Amino acid sequence: MTDQSYNFAYLDEQTKRMIRRAILKGLAIPGYQVPFASREMPMPYGWGTGGVQVSAAVLTPEDTMKVIDQGADDTTNAVSIRKFFERTAGVDTTTATSEASVIQTRHRIPEEPLHEDQILVYQVPIPEPLRFLEPRETETRKMHALEEYGLMHVKLYEDISRHGHIATSYAYPVKVEGRYVMDPSPIPKFDNPKMEMPAIQLFGAGREQRIYALPPWTKVVSLDFDDHPFEASKADHCCALCGANDSYLDEVITDDAGGRMFICSDTDYCEGRRAAGHRGPLNAEAAE
Amino acid sequence: MSVTPLLDVRGVTKHYGRHIGCKDVGFKLYPGEVMGIVGESGSGKTTLLNCLAGHQAADAGQVIFDTRVEGPRDTLLMSEPERRMLGRTDWAFVHQHARDGLRMGVSAGGNVGERLMAVGARHYGDIREQALDWLERVEIDGARVDDRPTTFSGGMQQRLQIARNLVTGPRLVFMDEPTGGLDVSVQARLLDLLRGLVRGMGLSAIVVTHDLAVVRLLADRLMVMKDGHVVETGLTDQVLDDPQHAYTQLLVSSVLQV
């Protein structure tokens, strides 16, 4: 039931217009970080204030919303944001990827391919991919404006010289439409190739007050070296519950004697497969 | 036959409010030549160098650089992308404090490779090979290629900064007190190295310093500045051995003879 003391989706209409303008500008210049007047939200920074504001600005009463955190629908962050919109917007919610029209996510892209009339909203902690190499905002803006991205490769060079391969495994920098270098938010690099998709992708960073966006089918290239090409890596196992070997896996420690198992990080995908009769090593044993 | 100057400086002036930074400075620098600029603290040497290198905007004047593709062009009228492109290809800038010119959080190899990557190098093996080659040329042990500059001594940091700047084969090097803050024996080695590199690569350089020994060793020509004005110019040995202006005489006579 909608709480009548709030405007639809919590934010007032002027604020939503302001955020929509930033989103439209972001869509017009894919990968460019648009500054916006981020509002205080009733949750701490780092919990998805940017994503929540973007979601609030794009939600309509007919939408069906899904919220995931590290791929899971049932973690604290996902549950509380879902409840927030149930209460303030009264929209339907779902955990099924295919049924949702707006999906807010933290750290994952759903395994199930998205389709054209969906919007994927990312929560972004630090939108500036150059930040840890160049602390000055004035300088990073200039580097984006002048397309000076040599520094991004210095980071990858450092990875190889220290670890023998590109060890960056999440928030892996990408180049958008041959122009802007963009931080894809802390999704695993396994998800990077999925970013060329038919759905709209919006990125909101609340504390840093930046919004950026990818229109459908935008060209997204992960940076690499000629002799150290990009590789979308994942744990070399199959899911213990559903047996999938094409999904991104979480490692779960099961005891203090080195016992562990790997399970799909996307809970909806995993449940869907199990409902369809797929079994992983763990379930197969249990069934016998 | 006349040679086009690599750098033609005309009437460069910079004011800080009512105070003069440097006033109406002009000179020509020919390919392969090293120009020394000496003067006491506050005489406008560094201001001049920063104006020439585009780090500060000059109030008036022209800095005409003989670019590879388009011939002589006034760098002060260039757009910023063009000037920054020059700054990482044909130009190099060696800071007095190595920390200003290095990325302290990045390994020595990464520091040397940055300029290569900035101009489009995308092959890790090649970049690393060039970095190792340059470390050797500035006498840094190749085994330290993955160490951060924070673990280097002052002299090594300065040599690393030089390697990082010269790796893209610049034609003009700006140096701001390259030996400042180093002890005397380290200074001597650094000067020796610099002289070898400058002569070997046929570099042109503008060296700002207050140390007359540095210009005696490195510079072909000398410019003496005081209160933002150039008071005397000439061949290095000529100016140092037979100073004409009263200030130059004072400067030369102030050097301790050991």
Image: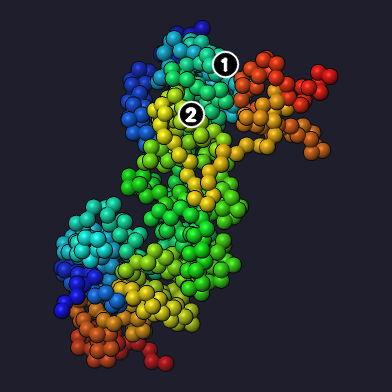
Residues at marks 2 and 1, CA–CA distance in whole angstroms: 18 Å
| Residue type highlighted by circle 2 | Tyr
Q: Residue at x 53, y 46 (%)?
A: A229
Q: Earlier in the sequence, mark 2 or mark 1?
A: 1
Residue B209 sits in quarter: bottom left
Can you see residue A288? yes
Residue placed furthest toward the right: A288
Cβ atoms under marks 2 and 1 closer than 8 Å:
no
Residue A248's x, y, as percent? 62, 31
Question: x and y percent of residue A241 in the render?
Answer: 72, 24
Relative horizontal placement of residue A238, taking residue B177 as reference (left or right) = right
Callout 2: SS: strand
- Quarter that holds the C terminus of chain A: top right
On what subunit does the disc labeled 1 rest?
A
Disc 1 is placed on an element classified as loop
The picture quadrant where one finds residue A270 is: top right
In the picture of the structure, the residue carrying the numbered disc 2 is A122
Q: Is residue B119 above or below residue A46?
A: below
Q: Is residue B250 left or right of residue B183?
A: left
Which mark, residue A96? 1
The chain identifier of the residue carrying mark 2 reads A
> Can you give x and y, in whole percent of width and height, for residue B65 in the image?
23, 65
Name the residue nearer the viewer: A107 or B121. Answer: B121
Q: Residue at x 22, y 83 (%)?
A: B234
Residue B58: x and y, percent?
21, 61
Pick whichever, A196 or B181, lies toward us. Answer: A196
Amino acid at circle 1: Ala
